[in-house]
Image: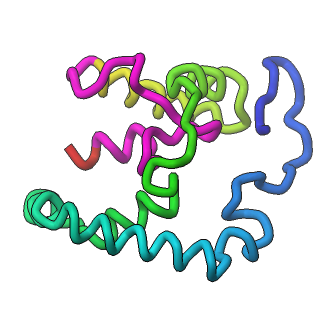
Amino acid sequence: PDLVPPGTKPPKRRPQSQAEFRSPGAYFSQRRLAALAATGRALQARWSGTLSRIEAKYGVPGRILLAIWGRETGFGAAAIPDSAFRVLATKAFMSGRKDLFRSELLSALEIVQRGDASPAIMKGSGAGAMGQPQFMPSSYLKSR
């Protein structure tokens, strides 16, 4: 998407291809949002104790956590097949935003060094966001 081999000029900026940057009709369809809301309410009832502990420890209301999880990956239904390290390293080397992704790659390495996750389970999107809530590595570290 925004990869630029060393020694070449970056191409003209293309429109973002992520769902939230395209036509909002599909991203915000009433049917899809209603289904996510229904699933979110069921999960809130099922995990109320856990969500309360998360809110007490981190200050993030459970409904916000569920909203992020639902919107980003459909509560884990979306496939996240890419190695976060492969994506971040490629973008750190060839992206038009090398500095950003170099910093994110270092943050991902810190996550592994601290023992929070192994490289094998660190899966992410093509944009470098990790896991089911799709947080960038630096955002994860800020919450620790």
| Prevailing secondary structure class for the magenta stretch in the rendered image | loop
Vertical side of 108 occupied by 55: above or below: below
Q: Between 97 and 18, which is closer to the camera in this rendering? A: 18
Q: Position of residue 28 (x, y in %)?
A: 65, 75
From the image, which quarter does the N terminus lie in?
top right
Identify the residue at horizontal 58%, vertical 20% (top origin).
Answer: 86
Q: Would residue 44 be visible to someone looking at this image? A: yes
Q: Position of residue 35 (x, y in %)?
A: 52, 73
Picture quarter containing residue 99?
A: top right
Q: Would residue 61 be visible to someone looking at this image? A: no
| Left or right, residue 75 beside residue 143 | right
Q: Position of residue 27 (x, y in %)?
A: 67, 69
Whether residue 135 is in magenta: the answer is: yes
| Left or right, residue 102 beside residue 57 | right
Q: Which residues are magenta?
A: 113-141
| Left or right, residue 15 beside residue 135 | right
Identify the residue at horizontal 44%, vertical 75% (top origin).
Answer: 37
Identify the residue at horizontal 32%, vertical 19% (top origin).
Answer: 118
Q: Between 83 and 38, which is closer to the camera in this rendering? A: 38
Whether residue 69 is in magenta: the answer is: no
Q: Between 129 and 101, which is closer to the camera in this rendering? A: 129
Vertical side of 32 occupied by 16: above or below: above
From the image, which quarter does the C terminus lie in?
top left
